[in-house]
Image (cartoon, rainbow, N blue to C red):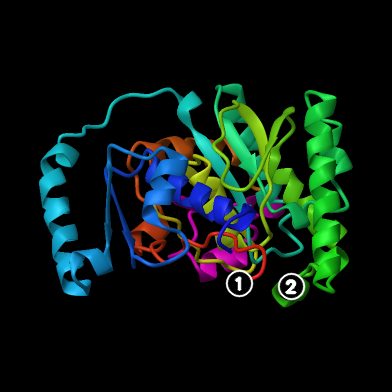
């Protein structure tokens, strides 16, 4: 598309990454004749400062563009290396709440535990972002009753109506949502999945509902409109400003998400023990009777603070995440 929401959405996503606090500098590379012209991106999103733009055709080809990019990195290394860690309050945390490869235990262990951690983040003045609109379908009334205003609640209802129309146009239906992996893990309906997925957001008020990759300015619990596909959803949350991802999984997702560290939460002990190299927290302790949901939530929050202070998550140790940038593509590809 040469104009309209698909292009605006892509530019909003790219701009969100370009502005992300976990990047020192950014290079925007284009071919030179694509629809999403870099000049248009820079003008529409008012990008400047840390960003260097170049297009392959004007630079004289691939090799010269790569050389220019390397030169830019060398230029900025001194400034980037000058950055030092400084103390910041937990109110600066902006956590993307994600789940993938969910199972029948997700809604009773890892998701409620992450919800308990979310409440602690909000209590300290931080922000948590729930997304994946199709995976809230059927249980959205539990969120609208927590909305701080009628306007915020109606925004969420409008998203559900949009998704109903969108899936109908594609000859699909929202009720067919659970994936084969979800079903193998014990989930049979979208309502089961939605009720479990919503637990990640804890119990605080819903303060805002935003569009995909829209910059998040509110403090507290925010809902972002995204598809249910994890990499696309997380990309939108990070573009909106999330500086960390907390990802619950029952089947064993190994997702990573640069530039935001991704904490992996296992729903059950057998999977955690089988995939311990990839899992950061075992929430199966709740099922085993070894700790309460609140105790596990506190443990997750403590890990959030350590990761924010530089401790590497399992996905970072594997260097996962560079290939997980996946903007939402809506509309026809022309």
Name the quarter where the C terminus is drawn.
bottom right
Q: Is residue 275 left or right of residue 23?
A: right
First-in-chain label (2 vs 1): 2
Q: Tell me where residue 186 sits by quadrant.
A: bottom right
Foreground residue among 306 and 245: 245
Vertical relation: 316 (above or below) 88: below
Instruction: Write the start and end of the magenta stretch as one range.
Output: 260-289
The residue that label 1 is drawn on is 333
Foreground residue among 62 and 151: 62
Residue depicted at x 50% and y 60%: 279
Residue depicted at x 64% and y 63%: 229
Name the quarter where the N terminus is drawn.
bottom right
The residue that label 2 is drawn on is 179
Local secondary structure at mark 1: loop
Q: Is residue 286 magenta?
A: yes
Foreground residue among 202 and 325: 325
| Whole-percent x, y for residue 47 in the image | 37, 40
Q: Is residue 303 magenta?
A: no
Foreground residue among 241 and 51: 51
Local secondary structure at mark 2: loop
Q: Is residue 22 visible?
A: yes
The CA span between labels 2 and 1 is 25 Å
């Amino acid at each position: 598309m040469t104009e309209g929401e698909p292009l605006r959405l892509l530019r909003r996503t790219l701009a969100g990454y370009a502005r992300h606090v976990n990047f020192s500098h950014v290079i925007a590379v284009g071919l030179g004749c694509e629809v999403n012209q870099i000049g248009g991106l820079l003008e529409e999103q008012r990008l400047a400062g840390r960003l260097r733009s170049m297009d392959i055709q004007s630079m004289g080809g691939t090799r010269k563009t790569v050389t220019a990019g390397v030169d830019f990195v060398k230029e900025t290394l001194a400034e980037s290396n000058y950055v030092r860690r400084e103390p910041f309050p937990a109110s600066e945390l902006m956590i993307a709440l994600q789940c993938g490869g969910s199972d029948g235990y997700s809604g009773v262990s890892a998701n409620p535990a992450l919800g308990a951690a979310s409440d602690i983040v909000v209590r300290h003045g931080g922000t948590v972002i729930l997304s994946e609109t199709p995976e809230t379908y059927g249980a959205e009334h539990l969120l609208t009753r927590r909305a701080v205003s009628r306007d915020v609640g109606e925004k969420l209802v409008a998203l559900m109506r949009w998704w109903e129309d969108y899936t109908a146009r594609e000859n699909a239906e929202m009720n067919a949502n659970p994936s084969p992996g979800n079903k193998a893990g014990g989930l049979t309906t979208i309502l089961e999945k939605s009720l479990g997925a919503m637990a990640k957001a804890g119990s605080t008020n819903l303060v805002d509902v935003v569009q995909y990759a829209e910059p998040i300015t509110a403090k507290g619990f925010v809902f972002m409109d995204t598809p249910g596909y994890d990499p696309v959803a997380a990309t939108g949350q990070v573009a909106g400003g999330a500086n960390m991802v907390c990802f619950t999984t029952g089947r064993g997702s190994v997702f990573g998400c640069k530039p935001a560290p991704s904490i992996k939460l296992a729903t059950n002990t057998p999977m955690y023990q089988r995939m311990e190299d990839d899992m950061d927290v075992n929430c199966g302790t709740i099922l085993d009777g070894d700790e309460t949901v609140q105790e596990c939530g506190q443990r997750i929050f403590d890990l959030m603070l350590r990761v924010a202070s530089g401790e590497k998550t399992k996905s970072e140790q594997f260097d996962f995440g560079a290939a997980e940038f996946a903007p939402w593509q809506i509309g026809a590809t022309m």
